[in-house]
Amino acid sequence: MRKQPAKTNRLINTVPAVDGPRVGVVPECCVITGARLMSHRRQFMQAAVATSVAGAGNSWQLAGSAWAAPAVERWRAKVVRLEALTHNVRRVSLLPLDTEFTFAAGQYVLLRAPAGYLTDFNARYQTKHKQVARPYSFASMPAAGSGFDLIIKHYPAPPDREDQVPPGVLSTYVHKHLKVGDTVQLGKPRGKLYSPTEPDRPVVMVAGGVGAAPFVGLLSHLFREGVDKEREIYFFLGVRSRKDLLLHEQFGQWAKTKPAFHYIPALSHPEPTDNWNGRKGYINVVLEKHFKDQLDAEVYLAGSPVMVKFTRQVLDKLGVKKERVHKDPIRVQ
C-alpha cells in the first residue's frame, strides 16, 4: 500500500558557521503555498527588518509568537554531517563542544548567524540585521555524550521579487554556506513539549512539511521509553507533493515494526508524476476524515499558523478539549 519515494537522502559537503536569538515558535508546512506563502514571507520579513532582532524558527510553541533578544547563554557545536532530505530541506548533525550541553525531548535551541555572514548579507540585500538567530526543534532524541540533529528548510527569495524580498537569513546561511567542520554558536536549549499524564489516552501528532522535525526526536524518545506499548500513536504528515515528503522511509519503517504506531502521510497537491496512492488533501481534512465523529486524545500540532488554525477547528468539532492540544505554528526564515 505504502509506496516509497525515490531516495533523496544524499550527503552534501558545502559552506560556513553560525550565531543568534528568540523564544517560542517553529517548523514549515504545506498549507501555506503559492501567493499565500509569499504574503506570509513578506509579512515576516517586514517584521524582521522592523525589529533589530529577526528571530523565529523551528520549535514548539512555548511563548506564542514571541520575539526575543539574543539569549545570554552561548554554546558551541561542530558540524559533523550535512544531508539533503528533500529539494529544500537539510538535516544538520552537530556535536556539542561543551560537555555541559544537554537537552530534553521536545525542546528547541537557538541557532545563531555569525557577524561576518550578516555583514555580507546586509550589503547584498540592503538589510540592517545586527543579530539573528532562529529556534529549531531538536530532531533527534537526547543521549548522553552524543550529538544531535536539526532539520532546516530553505526560504529563497521569490524568483520574481529577488530585488525586493530577500531570502531567509539563517536558512540561506545553513543551505548555502554551512559546511562540515564548521563551528556554530547556539543558545541554551529551552521549552517543554511532551509530558504524558494519562497512559490510556492515544497520542495524535499532526505536522505540516518541516513541522515533522520535532516529531522525529519526540517519536524516537517515546519509542525508547516504551510509550507505544501503553497507547496508540498517530502521526499525520501533510506536504504539497511527493518531492516535499521528508523522512517518508523512516516513518514508514516505524509503522511496520511498531504495531501501535500509525503513519498517515498526505499530499495536498500531488504532481501527475508522483504516482501517489495514499491520502490526498490538506492534512486537517485528512485528520477529520480519519477520526470522523469523535477523538479522545492528546494532540500535538507543528506547522504553519494557517495549518494549526484549521486543524484546531477540526479538533473542536471532534470534541478534543483545548487543554489536550499543544500547538507549534511555524514562523521561520
Image (tube, rainbow, N blue to C red):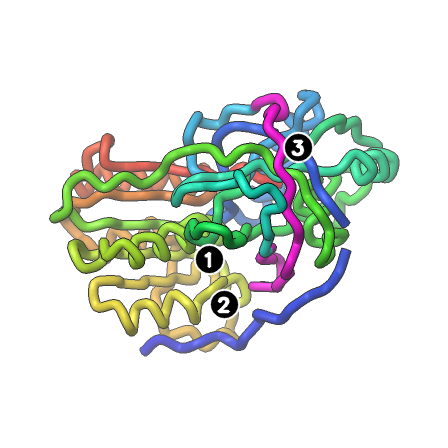
- Seen from the viewer's position, the closer of residues 147 and 121 is 147
Label 3 or label 2, whichever comes before in sequence order: 3
Tell me which amino acid carries mark 1: Val
Please state the horizontal and vertical placement of residue 190, each as a whole percent of the image: 47, 33
Q: Residue at x 59, y 47 (%)?
A: 96
Label 3 or label 1, whichever comes before in sequence order: 3
Residue contact between numbered discs 3 and 2, judged by CB atoms under 8 Å: no
Q: Is residue 318 left or right of residue 262?
A: left
Local crowd size for mark 1, using a 10 Å CA cut-off: few (<14), some (14–19), many (≥20): many
Residue at the spot of label 1: 239
| Quarter of image, res 130 | top right
Which numbered disc covers residue 20?
Answer: 3
Q: Is residue 305 left or right of residue 204?
A: right
| Quarter of image, res 229 | bottom left
Please state the horizontal and vertical placement of residue 29, each as a whole percent of the image: 49, 49
Q: Could you tell me which quadrant the C terminus lies in?
A: top right
Mark 2: which secondary structure?
Answer: helix
Q: Which residues are magenta?
A: 68-92
